[in-house]
Amino acid sequence: MRFSKTGYTPDQLLHLYKELITPRLIEEKMLILLRQGKISKWFSGIGQEAVSVGAVQALEADEYILPMHRNLGVFTGRNIPLNRLFAQFQGKLSGFTKGRDRSFHFGSKEHHIVGMISHLGPQMALADGIALANTLKQEQKATLVFTGDGASSEGDFHEALNVAAVWNLPVIFVIENNGYGLSTPSHEQFKFNSFLDKGPAYGIEAVQVDGNNILEVHRTISKLVKEVRKNPKPVIVEALTFRMRGHEEASGTKYVPKELMEHWAKKDPVENYEQYLLKNGVLTEQLIEEYKAEIKADIDTGLETAYAESLPEFKLETEVGDMFQPFEQEVKTPDSESKSDKRFVDAISDGLKQSLERYDNLVVMGQDIGDYGGVFKITEGFIEKFGRERIRNTPLCESAIIGTGLGLCINGYKAVVEMQFADFVTCGFNQIVNNLAKIHYRWNQNADVVVRMPTGAGVGAGPFHSQSNEAWFFHTPGLKIVYPSNPYDAKGLLNAAIEEPNPYMFFEHKALYRSLSQEIPDDYYTIEVGKAAITQEGEDISIITYGMGVHWAKALSEELKEISIEVIDLRTLSPWDSETVAESVKKTNKALVLHEDTMIGGIGAEVSAWISEHLFEHLDAPVARIASLDTPVPFTKTLEENFLPIKRLKEKVIDLNSY
């Protein structure tokens, strides 16, 4: 291994040495604690320390870095107090996740660190968003994100690189190529010879470094960081390295050939750099002893503090309360009485436009939303008014764009992400249910992202453009879900969702876009989130529904004038308004839950179960449910009409009324 100290002072060389041995000494201690059962799991970075240390030392303290589970040197390099770090490893309250997540699955705003999730790839899109925010703020800052050679097989890798390339984002993608994804060797992961081959395919620069050579890593990344600050662009850095222990300690290294382990043992980043400094008279044996004694004392002190802390005490209100960023909604009323007739589609566009005017840190992203105005023309004319920086036409990459939205939020922005159709959200599902939904609960980071979802059937669009998929997200704690049924609610609830610093899934029934109009305020206003509306009062039956179901129920009540039907429009599905539902059912004593989504596992199951459990003594009949068939949505009109519950609704209401 060849080192070159050109350009480094002795103090700088010693600083890098001290930073390099710190994670090694911590790891050696952690492995002892693991065997003693004092920590539950450990992902070793022994052999790879030079990559983490070289990278973090090349950045400014206020530049974001996104590490993975073998990057302990990043956390120590950002001077995170060891007692807090050890408390995190032990699941203590003073750790960064309050005992809710383990090891390096955390972030710290104070230290400009955004931790990983177990799915490995998604953090790369977050780096895109953080870098985009820096670009929009015209700040000359770089963002650095780590990934591994194994994770490069994931779609998130491609999407994040592609977005960064297309948008010229100042992101350094450091790929730690240690030859294995757990036990699977590289030749079973990919066909290419080197990650240098990846750069030209995306139109970006790619460089390779000896990941065990601290000076080469630090010098290379320092140079690249300076370049991308002045001239924003993404860069791939392939760091060739090797982990000397298992993927995690339980897996071992028996799958690694002995000669390969011996080869990389000779390239140990700590030992080789230490010997180089000794040989060049920069380091002495006495200094080594002093440094190690100081670091070990800090480790012991940190552990003593962490050990003294008891495990978190369970408090229901805290666990549930920490799902969302605290926010007290103040309902906004229009500034004037001016009103005009607007279609559903116009109300959505109006609310989005006024929110963009209200929040200069709001960015809207989606496929074809630029000059084309979106497939439903929601954003038509927006580029002329707000510019291309805030109305961002995106590549076809739902996962990366949702992740970019979260990255924007981490760095001080708000984001609205348009799914071209709600069906396509499957391609971004992981970012929603594992990043947006969990990030505040895990480490107190808000997710100021609204995902707009054109949804629903009735337009002959077939199985992949017609699904009602709100129940997928209803089951996921940490998401708020809104599904308006009319233009007034659509505008007011969209504005409310954008105001709040929490993740929203906002469903818009596309069959209502141009078929329904209403006189609504011209000015900005909001509607209370979590509050249902009684759209029609009645005495005999309560129909609890939302979206298109509201119109079906009201149309039926006009037809069945002999039955007095009360129609409850939930509007917000999570959290849903059980109080309004209870008041209605106590009055009518009969309840029917209606939704367009398929029956099994639908939101109606939860609502009907709640009514049965809490209002049983007020019921004069079993709670009824009606929904679409448990099949995909068919294309042909005759099939689609019978898939939907419209024709079966009348019979169900008559049967319930006569019970």
Image: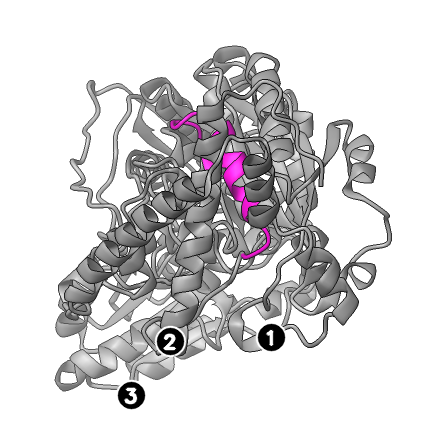
User: What is the quadrant of the C terminus in the image?
Assistant: bottom left
**Tag 1–tag 3 contact (CB < 8 Å):** no
User: What is the quadrant of the N terminus in the image?
Assistant: top right
Q: Provide the residue span drawn in magenta.
A: 46-65
Question: Dot 1 lies on which element?
Answer: loop
Q: Is residue 199 above or below residue 80?
A: above
Q: Is residue 205 inside the magenta stretch?
A: no
| Residue drawn 74% across the image and 27% down it | 205
Amino acid type of the residue tagged 1 in the rendering = Gly
**Mark 3 or mark 2, earlier in chain:** 2
Side of 68 relative to 414 (left or right): right
**Distance from the alpha carbon under mark 3 to that under mark 2:** 21 Å
Q: Which residue is mark 2?
A: 605
Q: Position of residue 373 (x, y in %)?
A: 60, 25
Q: Nearer the viewer, residue 641 or 313?
A: 313
Side of 481 relative to 636 (left or right): left
Q: Residues within 10 Å of mark 3 (few under 14, many from 20)?
A: few
| Residue drawn 16% across the image and 61% down it | 318
Query: Which dot, 2 or 1, sits closer to the camera?
Result: 1
Amino acid type of the residue tagged 3 in the rendering = Tyr
Q: Which residue is mark 1?
A: 252
Q: Position of residue 112 (x, y in %)?
A: 38, 35
Amino acid type of the residue tagged 2 in the rendering = Ala
> Within the image, what quadrant is residue 537 found in?
bottom left
Q: Which residue is mark 3?
A: 659
> Within the image, what quadrant is residue 563 found in?
bottom left
Q: Position of residue 321 (x, y in %)?
A: 19, 57
Side of 578 relative to 172 (left or right): left
Q: Is residue 647 visible?
A: yes
Q: Is residue 268 above or below residue 103?
A: above
Query: Which dot, 3 or 2, sits closer to the camera?
Result: 2
**Tag 2–tag 1 contact (CB < 8 Å):** no
